[in-house]
Image (cartoon, grey):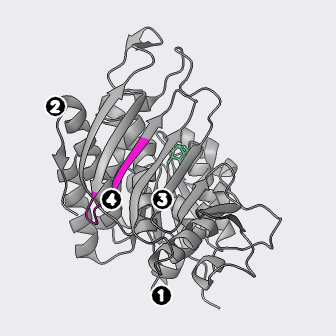
C-alpha cells in the first residue's frame, strides 16, 4: 500500500476545517497548518488535527512532508499563496476565486500547467451523486433539447445589517462578493451538468444594506444574471446572501423539450425528473444510479450524504490525480479561471447595463 498523501493547509477558518476533515476521510493526512500568525497556527493545529503547525506559509511550502498545499485564506491571498506552493513544487488545491482579476487567474493557471502539478478548485457540488446522475442522463439525450436553464443560490448569513466579514471588503474579497462567492458555484454546476457554456450575459446587482457595522459597503448582497449559451439555451440565476431563512439554497431546473431536471442542495438525496405526463423522483440509491454517479454514493440509500461528503469525494479525486490516475470531472484551475471570467463579466454587465460576451 502506498503512503498517505500529505496535505499542508493554509488558513484556519471554516473552510480549513472542511478541508482537514475531507483529507482524513479520503485517507490523506494533514501534516501542517499555517495561519495568519505562528500563534494562530499553534492554536489551530490541534483543532484541525494537523501533525504540526508551520510558523509561516514560507515554512509550510518548503516542508518535505507536504505533498499538496490547500489554500483556504481570504480571497486576496489565494494567488500569492498558490504561486508560492507551485514554485515549491507542490500540488495545489486553491479555494475560489483563484485571483481577483481574470488576468491574474490566467497567470496562475498557466503556471500550474507549466510546473505540471495537480491543481484543483473545490467546486464541490459536482460531487453529489444526484448531480452526476442528472449529468449522465442529460449527456445521453434524455432531456431532449435543453432550452431553459434556471435556478438560484440563496444564503442568509449576511442578513443582519451588523453582520460583516472580510468578504465584504473589496480589497480582501474582490469587486464581486455574492456572485464571486456562491454565484460561481451555480454557473460551474450548470456548465458541468448540461455541457452548455455561457457565451453572453447581462446582470444587475443590489444591496440589502448600504452600510455594515457603520461602514459603507461597496460589494453586492445579491445579483440577477440573465445568460445565453453556446447551444442556444436561455438561462437565469438569482444569487443572494441576504435571503432570510435560506441557508445554502442552491437549486436548479434544467428544462429540455422532453424532460426537466431539478436539484436542491438542501435536499440532495433526490433528483426530480419532470415529464409532461409524469414526474419521477430518483433516490440516491447506489443500486439504481448510473455507474458514473454510483461511484460517489458511498452510503446505502436512506443514509443521507451531504456537503462534507462532496468535499471528501473531491479530495479523494485530488489524491487519485496526485497518484497519477485519470479523474473525470475534477474541477481544476481551468475551471477556476472560467469562474473568474464569468465573475468579471457579471461585474462589467452590472456596471454598464449591457450584454457582455464570453468565450465559450
Ligand atoms: O464556497 C462556498 C462558500 O464560500 C460554499 O460552498 C458555501 O458558501 C459555504 O460557504 C460559502
| Label 1 sits on residue | 325
Q: State yes or no: discs 4 and 2 in contact (Cβ < 8 Å).
A: no
Residue named by callout 3: 254
Residue at point 64% right, 55% down? 307
Per the image, the residue denoted by label 4 is 233
Ligand 1 near label 4 (Cβ, under 8 Å)?
no
- Asked if the residues shown at circle 2 and circle 1 are in contact, with their CB atoms under 8 angstroms apart, the answer is no
Kind of element beneath mark 4 = loop
The residue mark sitting in front, 1 or 4, is: 4
Does 231 lie within the magenta span? Answer: yes
From mark 1 to mark 3, how far is it between C-alphas? Answer: 31 Å
Write the residue at 48% across / 59% down.
254
Where residue 85 sits in the image (x, y, percent)?
Answer: 36, 62
Q: Is residue 238 left or right of residue 88?
A: right
Magenta highlight range: 229-237
For mark 2, what is the residue? Answer: 352
Residue 113: give x, y in percent of width and height: 26, 73
Mark 3 → mark 2, Cα distance in angstroms: 28 Å
The reply to whether residue 315 is in sight is no
Distance, label 4 to label 2, CA atoms, is: 23 Å
146 relative to 186, above or below = below
Residue 61 within the segment the image draws in magenta = no
Q: How many angstroms separate mark 1 from mark 4 (CA)? A: 34 Å
Name the residue furthest top. Answer: 214
- Closer to the observer: label 3 or label 2? 3
Q: Earlier in the sequence, mark 2 or mark 1?
A: 1
**Residue 333 location in percent, x, y?**
33, 64
Amino acid at each position: 500500500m502506498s503512503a498517505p498523501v500529505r496535505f499542508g493547509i493554509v488558513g484556519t477558518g471554516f473552510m480549513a476545517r472542511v478541508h482537514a476533515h475531507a483529507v482524513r476521510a479520503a485517507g490523506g493526512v494533514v501534516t501542517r497548518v499555517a495561519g495568519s500568525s505562528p500563534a494562530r497556527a499553534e492554536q489551530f493545529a490541534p483543532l484541525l488535527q494537523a501533525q504540526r503547525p508551520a510558523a509561516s506559509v514560507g515554512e509550510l511550502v518548503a516542508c518535505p512532508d507536504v505533498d499538496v498545499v490547500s489554500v483556504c485564506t481570504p480571497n486576496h491571498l489565494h494567488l500569492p499563496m498558490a504561486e508560492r506552493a507551485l514554485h515549491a513544487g507542490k500540488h495545489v488545491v486553491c479555494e475560489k476565486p483563484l485571483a481577483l482579476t481574470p488576468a491574474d487567474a490566467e497567470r496562475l493557471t498557466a503556471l500550474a500547467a507549466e510546473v505540471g502539478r495537480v491543481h484543483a478548485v473545490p467546486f464541490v457540488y459536482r460531487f453529489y451523486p444526484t448531480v452526476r446522475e442528472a449529468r449522465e442522463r442529460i449527456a445521453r439525450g434524455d432531456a431532449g433539447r435543453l432550452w431553459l436553464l434556471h435556478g438560484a443560490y440563496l444564503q442568509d448569513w449576511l442578513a443582519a445589517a451588523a453582520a460583516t466579514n472580510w468578504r465584504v471588503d473589496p480589497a480582501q474579497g474582490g469587486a464581486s462578493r455574492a456572485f464571486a462567492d456562491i454565484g460561481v458555484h451555480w454557473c460551474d454546476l450548470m456548465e458541468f451538468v448540461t455541457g452548455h457554456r455561457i457565451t453572453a450575459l447581462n446582470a444587475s446587482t443590489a444591496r440589502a444594506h448600504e452600510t455594515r457595522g457603520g461602514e459603507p459597503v461597496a460589494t453586492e448582497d445579491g445579483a440577477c444574471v440573465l445568460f445565453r449559451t453556446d447551444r442556444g439555451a436561455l438561462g437565469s440565476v438569482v444569487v443572494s446572501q441576504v435571503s432570510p431563512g435560506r441557508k445554502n439554497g442552491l437549486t436548479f431546473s434544467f428544462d429540455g423539450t422532453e424532460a426537466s431536471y431539478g436539484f436542491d442542495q438542501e435536499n440532495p438525496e433526490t433528483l426530480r425528473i419532470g415529464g409532461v405526463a409524469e414526474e419521477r423522483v430518483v433516490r440516491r440509491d447506489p443500486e439504481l444510479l448510473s455507474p458514473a454517479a454510483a461511484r460517489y454514493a458511498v452510503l446505502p440509500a436512506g443514509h443521507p450524504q451531504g456537503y462534507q461528503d462532496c468535499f471528501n469525494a473531491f479530495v479523494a479525486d485530488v489524491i487519485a490525480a496526485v497518484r497519477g490516475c485519470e479523474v473525470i470531472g475534477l474541477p481544476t484551475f481551468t475551471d477556476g479561471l472560467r469562474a473568474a471570467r464569468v465573475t468579471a463579466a457579471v461585474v462589467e454587465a452590472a456596471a454598464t447595463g449591457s450584454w457582455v460576451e464570453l468565450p465559450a
